[in-house]
Amino acid sequence: MKRYVATRMVTMFGVLMITLLITISLVGSNMDTILKQGVVFQVRSEITEDPTISESFSSVEEFEGFIQSQTDQRIKVLGLDEPWYSPQRIGLTMYKILFLDFGHATFLISDSGSSDVKDIIFEKLPRTILLFTTATIIISIIGIFLGALSSSKVGSIIDRITSSFAIISSSFPVWWIGMLMIFLFSFTYQIFPARATPDIPSSDPGYIGALLYHMTLPLITIVMIGFGSWAYLVRNFMVGIMQEDFIMAKKTIGIKQNKIIYTHALKNAAPPIVTILALSLSGSLGGAIITEAVFDWPGMGRLYFEAITVMDLPVIIGATYILTVFFLVSIFIADLLYGYFDPRVRTGQ
Amino acid sequence: MSSLSPQEIKQEFLKSKIGITGIAILAILVATSIIAIVAIPVETFQEWNNPSSWILYPKVAIPIWVNLFMTEKIPEHKILETPNIQTYSQGEVSLTSYQFGLNFDYDDFPNDFIYEFTSEYTGSPLLQMTVIRPDGIKLELLSTSLPFSNSKTIHSERIFSTDEVIKKNLSLQSELFAFTFNRSSAEDIVFSKIQTNEPLKGNYIFLIDLYSVSSESQISESKLIIGGKAFGVMGTDELRRDLAIGLLWGTPLALFIGLVVAIASVIMGLIYGVYAGFKGKKTDETMMRFNDVIYALPALPFLIILSVTISNSIFLMVGFLMIFGWVGIAKVARSMSLQIKTRGYVDAAKMMGQKDSKIIFKHILPQLLPYAFASIAISVPAAITTEAGLSFLGLGDPSFPTWGQILHDANTFGAAARGLWWWIMPPGVMIAITGLAFVFIGSALDAIVNPKLKR
């Protein structure tokens, strides 16, 4: 077991590093230009703030030369004179990112006014967790019960409705349903607000209530689209298990159908269900970009979208890193749980 | 693992209602694509993002068929292009008269009317615009002379109903009407009943008379546009684009994206997984670790970064989608090939000294074909929705109007808030229907391949 955990952890860390490397190499050259522009801007603003510097030069050339040398000096100090793909710089960047030092955002700021990428991300993350984790939990609870119910009555009306609903709902994009829901419930019937961002400051005591109220419409949408496929998945696992010999044996002994389903069968279907739960919990963090953009929910997804539209690279790198970490941790947990439930996995077979 | 022969699969498939429905929808979609490609010239759809090519169309017009369900008919947008031409001449002066007939049968005033013409002339001919209404009243709208030219010249102009001159001319004839004009616009007067300011139904004739001294003057091209609030089968959007064209052209694009991505990633995944499973040991271990790496990459964020930094061309996008598509299939294919590997005939083939590649392609892959078809069908909707999602975020290829892009525009122009349902509903329904077709086919195949689920 220890060996198993250790190899998984090493693999996960390797994956994390590779993800980081890919991200950096995709945005590296853009990042460089932006950083250099930042330095030039900094030098120029310092000079304009202090008129004595510009007065001490006799000619324009001399002045420009001074700016140039200042800029070059700083670029050298920051290590920007080497290309972004030089090993030292990539190493340094990755080391910094590994310990959550993402630097400062170029354009975006957090609600509290900080431009530190870490602050921005940790301000948005709880909101995404609030909305999507709640949704995922509701979805999985409905899904497991509906799935178990329809697997107990294969071919019944409930089973058919569940299966067809699962098939139909899985082919609708969530964000499109979101647009329709906004169209219906925010404008045609004005029940819920169209923008999911509460318009009162976060320090207000009524903020939590407002947030929950604004959360309702996206929550309903996500649950509506999500639970069908969950139910279908659980149903298929259960149907498979119900055909196993030990269940048949229990049936012949005369144990009640319901008891078999909810205790024996569900327990045996647990490993894949738990795995999928762990994966979809983390998947809900990253896959929410478009949904958050539609509902204007102030979470990670929208942050990501905003960062991409203005090309705020530190934020993009930071958010990708955080999302990857969450994803990997949940894969890891899912693996461990699977190993715990199903001892065959542990032995490495 | 079941080893069904193709005939058996076909028979089973034809028995499943869902599968047949899926095939039927797919056939309709393919037919739509063919119609789109044949009937709508590629040029039209390449002009999708060129505002000047849509100038004659109305803004956010509702689909025409809505009128069937309305008691109050919404005025249709009409583009009249073939006038009746009559020529008279009296001595030196010649008169060419262009008549546009219009049957106006709606319960609301049109938005505006525009007369667009190109004329060839010398000198300075006089252009007169009048309208004969169903009640026989003749209204003078405009009389203007075209800019003077010594030699033969070509002149293009648009006359708008919002022109001050037309308003002035109408107010000169205000004694014909029983109500005061106040701030009513030209079209509200021209199409109004005499007693009250309500639309008058019937046949209108718009007359454009060109008086000139030399007989060479003529209007070579002319269009009268009666700006309505309903247009086309699917309506138009804020940028005056005919949504029917976008929706039609979206079909082949979506099918292209979905099928290419699905087929390519399933083939890649199958070969990768089978090879890893068949080789086993170190090769298997390394290949599966690589698979883990790709599996752990957050797909959507990476797709976004790729499309922003590298290119948003639709063909590259297809490639990016493939990168993330094959991983899951490779995992399943590997475990299946691990099972098949242990079968006698594979051992026998090995013993006979057959090449690895031959064993894989002749003995293992054919066994996985039913699974492959099922997963192709199941991966198509995912590819289509992902592409639509990227386009919706504004990261799609701007030169191709995909359904996602139409929805992106709808979102940008606040279609939901303005109640423009014909802009939001159809693209999403099309995405869903296309997805459904493949999900139906996929689940029918799935039920055949995994008979356990059926029972």
Image: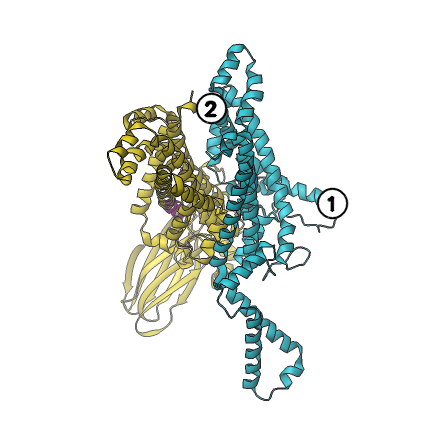
Chain colours: A cyan, B yellow
User: Can residue A312 be spotted in the picture?
Assistant: no
Name the image quarter holding the N terminus of chain B. top left
Q: Amino acid at mark 1?
A: Gly
B441 lies left or right of A250? left
Label 2: chain letter:
A
Is B165 in front, or is A35?
A35
Please identify, in this view, whether the residue under mark 1 or under mark 2 is nearer the observer: 2
Q: Position of residue B226 (x, y in %)?
A: 42, 52
**Separation (CA) of disc 1 from disc 2:** 49 Å
Q: Position of residue B110 (x, y in %)?
A: 47, 50
Residue beneath disc 2: A240
**First in sequence: mark 1 vs mark 2:** 1
Q: Secondary structure at mark 2?
A: helix
Query: Quick one: label 2, few (<14), some, or many (20+) residues within 10 Å?
Result: some
Residue beneath disc 1: A206
Would you say residue B245 sits in the magenta stretch?
yes
In contact (CB < 8 Å): disc 1 and disc 2: no
Q: Amino acid at mark 2?
A: Gly
Residue at (54% x, 50% y) in the render: B414
Is A313 in front, or is B13?
A313
User: Can residue A83 be spotted in the picture?
Assistant: yes
Query: Quick one: label 1, few (<14), some, or many (20+) residues within 10 Å?
Result: few
Is B85 in front, or is A338?
A338
Q: Which residues are magenta?
A: B244-251
Name the image quarter holding the C terminus of chain B. top left
B419 lies left or right of A206? left
Residue A215 in which image quadrant: top right
